[in-house]
Image: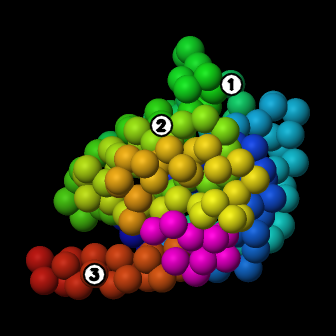
């Protein structure tokens, strides 16, 4: 599989439970998924193990200078912001809090760049504050697809609401719908990308 699709998911309060519902029985997808979950450091490993146990995708804590690979899920550890260099390499950097948090999903989403043959998907889940709003706007501006969790299923609707207010959210969905939409989008984008590659050969 060629890694041409990058998914960035942001979550805060209530996120671990919602993430588990999205990832349960999620098949191996032709994409890299980066999760920015606001959490204390002592639960980093437990969340990674919990998600890894419910999907055949490889879920692990991200490492600095790690290349993004299809079929892999990268959970950003507490205390580091994550930037994606040239849509290919994951960098963990220390820095001041952004939106009062570290890691901040805005930092990760806004590091993505428009590039021929690449597609981005941004997802904002339950949480307090507005982290992810600027990132969602950025992903939409570079031609990506965007999703926010709906109010009914959100433990705290702050982050999804702020993302929706930007006018840059394509779909407002429940966790179960996000699960299905992610599978559908990756499948469709992969088909389009493969057709494009064949035409250019």
Residue 66 % position (x, y): 54, 43
Q: Which residue is mark 2?
A: 106
The span from disc 3 to disc 2 (Cα, nearest Å) is: 28 Å
Dominant SS of magenta comes to helix
Asked if residue 53 lies in the magenta stretch, the reply is no
**Residue 121 placement: quadrant:** bottom left
Residue 64 % position (x, y): 57, 34
Tag 1 and tag 2, C-beta contact below 8 Å = no
* Residue drawn 48% across the image and 82% down it: 184
* Residue drawn 45% across the image and 53% down it: 164
Q: Nearer the viewer, mark 3 or mark 2?
A: 2
Q: Which residue is mark 3?
A: 192
The span from disc 1 to disc 3 (Cα, nearest Å) is: 37 Å
Tag 3 and tag 2, C-beta contact below 8 Å = no
Tag 1 and tag 3, C-beta contact below 8 Å = no
**Residue 140 placement: quadrant:** bottom left
Q: Is residue 3 left or right of residue 8?
A: left
Where the C terminus falls, by quadrant? bottom left
Residue in front for this viewpoint, 157 or 108? 157
Q: Which residues are magenta?
A: 171-181
- Which of pointers 3 and 2 lies earlier in the amino acid sequence? 2
């Amino acid at each position: 599989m060629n890694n041409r699709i990058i998914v960035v998911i942001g979550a805060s309060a209530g996120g671990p439970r919602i993430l588990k519902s999205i990832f349960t029985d999620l098949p191996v997808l032709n994409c890299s998924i980066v999760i920015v979950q606001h959490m204390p450091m002592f639960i980093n490993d437990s969340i990674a193990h919990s998600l890894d146990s419910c999907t055949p995708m490889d879920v692990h804590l991200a490492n600095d200078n790690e290349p993004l690979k299809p079929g892999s899920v990268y959970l950003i550890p507490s205390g580091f912001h994550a930037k994606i260099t040239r849509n290919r390499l994951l960098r963990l950097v220390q820095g001041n809090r952004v939106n009062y948090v570290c890691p901040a999903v805005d930092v990760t989403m806004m590091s993505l760049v428009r590039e021929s043959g690449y597609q981005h998907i941004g997802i904002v889940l339950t949480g307090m504050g507005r982290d992810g709003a600027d990132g969602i706007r950025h992903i939409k501006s570079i031609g990506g697809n965007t999703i926010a969790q709906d109010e009914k299923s959100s433990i705290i609707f702050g982050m999804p609401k702020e993302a929706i207010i930007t006018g840059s959210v394509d779909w407002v969905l429940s966790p179960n719908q996000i699960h299905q939409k992610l599978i559908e989008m990756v499948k469709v984008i992969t088909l389009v990308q493969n057709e494009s590659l064949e035409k250019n050969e």
